[in-house]
Structures are given as structure tokens and as C-alpha cells.
Amino acid sequence: MKTKIFLLEDDLTLCETIVDFLEDNDFEVVTAYDGEEASDIIYEQTFDLFLLDVNVPRINGFELLKQKREDGVKTPAIYITSLNSIDSLEDGYKSGCDDYIRKPFILKELLFRIKTIIKRNFFHESNAKIKIDENIEYDTELNLLFVNSKQIQLNTKTSLLLKLFLQNQEEVISHERIYDTLWSYEESASENALRTYIKNLRKIIGKEKIVSIKKIGYRFSSK
């Protein structure tokens, strides 16, 4: 399943440029050109991330996100805007955004910000508890794993790996996608380290839960 992004941008040329770039990077993108249309789409569909231009017709990006936050929508959001003042920045964060990128920007910077947010926010329901096995569950609000109601300490990358598996159950996840999720641009991905993280997770949740797909990647089994 691809990461699904909603883009609100009334500059048609910029909108098309962003969509082409994100689709080339394996994201699914749904667009709107004004705030009212955006509001309807967000009501009807579920997304992994919002990219919201601020100065758009009808309902601006600040007001749109503020309304959605009041409605209980917890989807992470990045504002795209030409506004530069500190007051505007403060208004943006007060309305519920997670990040803020100013125009003009480099597309690679946008991609980096998107991936950073996605790594932190894997689940739409902040209070959801995912049952992995009869006595194992993952608390998505606290980002904690529990076995027999006892908290199990995971390091950062092992936790990211588990969340990636839980978000994509029964889907084959390539080694490359795992590397992109666990390691930042400044870090060098390690095949040996990944094997260690897989081994450690299997000890906790069961070897049968993480299936190796030779030369491709891994699949998390919910059965």
C-alpha cells in the first residue's frame, strides 16, 4: 500500500510539479485547488499526510486544518506557503501543523520533510491499540510494545521497523523501503544491522510473524 498524500495547491503548475515528483517517489497523491473542495475530500477519504498551501480560495490552509483538528482529524500536516513572518509561523503551528516549508523550495527538501513526518506518524488513530498476538499489543499513542501487559523496551530503529510492519501487514516490504524508513539521509543503511533488528523482533513477537522473502524483503503475517 502506497503512502497516500493530500495536496492543496491553487498554483496549477506547482501542483502538477509536486504531484509528478511525489508519484515518481512512489506516493499516491490526491489534489484540490481550493479549501472547500479540500474539506470535502478530507471528509470522504483517509490520508497519511496533508500538504496544504495557505493562501488558497474560499477556505485558507490555516482555517482548513484548524477545522479538521476540531473535528478530530489527527493526520499530520505540512504547510506550503510564501508567508515569512514569525506571526504567520506561529499561527500555522497553533492551527495544528507538524511542519512548515516556504516557497520557493527544492523538491528534495519537501521529500525529506515528508519522510521525516511519515516516520513519526504511522497511524491515523492516536489512541489505537493493535493486537499482534493473544498476549502482545502495540500502543500507537505511546509507541510502546507490551507483552503480557509488560512494557518491552525497543530501540528507535527496531520501533520504526515494527511500526512499518504493522502499517503494512501481509504486504511484502522491500529492503530498500525498510532502509529508507529506518535510516536518514545522513546515515548509511546496514544490512547486518537490519538482520539484527529482525532477529530481535522475532524473539519478542514470534519468528513466524516476520517472513523472509528471499532477495526481496520481508512480510509481516497477522495470522
Image: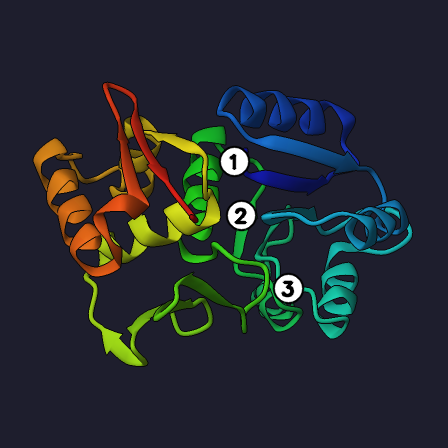
Q: Quadrant of residue 175?
A: top left
Cα distance in 3D space between marks 2 and 1: 7 Å
Is the residue marked by circle 1 packed among few (<14), some (14-19), or many (20+) residues within 10 Å?
few
* Nearest to N terminus: mark 3 or mark 2: 3
Left or right: where does residue 169 sit relative to residue 173? right
Mark 1 sits on what residue? Answer: 105
Residue 21 x %, y %: 55, 23
Q: Quadrant of residue 192?
A: top left
Quick check: 17 above or below 221? above
Q: Tell me the kind of residue under disc 2.
A: Ile
Mark 2 sits on what residue? Answer: 101
User: Which element type, helix, strand or loop, lies under badge 1?
Assistant: loop
Q: Give yes or no for contact between labels 2 and 1 (Cβ–Cβ under 8 Å).
A: yes
Which residue is found at the position 76% from the left and 47% from the top?
45
Which residue is found at the position 33% from the left and 41% from the top?
181
Left or right: where does residue 8 sit relative to residue 155? right
Q: Is residue 8 visible?
A: yes
Which residue is found at the position 72% from the left and 35% from the top?
30
* Nearest to N terminus: mark 3 or mark 1: 3
Depth check, front residue: 157 or 8: 157
Residue 51, which numbered label? none
Q: Quadrant of residue 115?
A: top left
Is the residue marked by circle 2 packed among few (<14), some (14-19), or many (20+) residues within 10 Å?
some
Left or right: where does residue 70 sit relative to residue 207? right
Mark 3 sits on what residue? Answer: 88
User: Which element type, helix, strand or loop, lies under badge 3?
Assistant: helix
Q: Tell me the kind of residue under disc 3.
A: Ser
Cα distance in 3D space between marks 3 and 2: 12 Å
Q: Tell me the kind of residue under disc 1.
A: Phe
Residue 135 x %, y %: 34, 71
